[in-house]
Amino acid sequence: MTTRILDIMMAAGAALAVLLGSFGAFARECDEIPQEVLRLHIPANSDSEYDQAVKLKVRDYILEEYGAQLSGCGSREEAVEEVRRLLPDIEKSCCEYLSQQGADYGARAELTEMYFTTREYENVTLPAGDYLALRITLGSGEGHNWWCVMFPPLCILELPGGEIDYEELKTNSLLIKLLKSIDGGKLWNTISEKLR
């Protein structure tokens, strides 16, 4: 009886060690993801239909004007430095764009660390946590917001009618590294099968 109890306890202990080891690896992976990405966060002036529509127009404008510049970056650090360099231009061009749209308020652009809830993009899940973000506050910023991952360039998945250059996606090593790190590479395998 003692040997059987000892065997059961050892098996349970081994199973617990494997489970905790897997959870620990998953937790480390979740902790690393915020260090790999730069988010885009755009709070609207208000929740009025007009301000919400303007927010989406500003989103499209930002991604069109600045998305390509960031997609050429090889790391989050490069993307952050590029945004830092462009920050005055981003704020100025957003204010000009808002004026062209007839908005009676401006925009404030900043790089800031902020909390985001869990977010799913197609088959990619980003865990909740503190992320560095390019935040563009429209007017008072009291309306509902819109956000995505600006680097690596996952925002395009959110755009209506947005298209993905799959050849570029296959060669963007940082994005591939991120995708391969999720779920032991199963996610990347699923995506690469769909790209064939």
Image (spheres, rainbow, N blue to C red):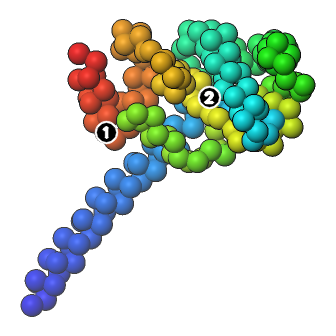
Query: How far from the left and from the top, in percent, is residue 113?
Result: 72, 38
- Of marks 2 and 1, the one in the foreground: 2
Residue that mark 2 sits on = 38
Find residue 166 and report its image quarter. Answer: top left
Q: Is residue 48 left or right of residue 191?
A: right
**Mark 2 crowd level (few <14, some 14–19, many ≥20, 10 Å Cα):** many
Q: Mark 1 points at which residue?
A: 184
Residue 176, relative to residue 148: is it above or below? above
Q: Nearer the viewer, residue 124 or 107?
A: 107
Indicate left or right for 148 with 121 as reference.
right
Residue at 34% from the left image edge and 41% from the top image edge: 183
* Residue type indicated by callout 2: Leu
User: Residue 60 bears which disc, if any?
Assistant: none
Report whether residue 123 is seen.
yes
Q: In the drawing, does residue 26 fall left or right of residue 92? A: left
- Give the mark nearest the N terminus, 2 or 1: 2
Between 3 and 54, the one nearer to me in the picture:
54
Tell me whether the residue at label 2 lies in contact with that at label 1, contact meaning CB atoms closer than 8 angstroms: no
Query: Outermost residue toward the front?
Result: 49
Residue kind at label 1, given as amino acid type: Gly
Quadrant for the N terminus in the image:
bottom left
Q: Where is residue 150 in the image (x, y as percent from the top left)?
A: 59, 24
Task: Give the residue at x 68% y 21%.
Answer: 57
**Residue placed furthest toward the bottom:** 1
Residue visible at 66% across and 26% down in the picture = 56
**Measuring 34% from the left and 53% from the top, which residue is drawn there?**
22
Q: Which of 46 and 178 is in front in this view?
A: 46
Spatial CA distance of label 2 from label 1 is 23 Å
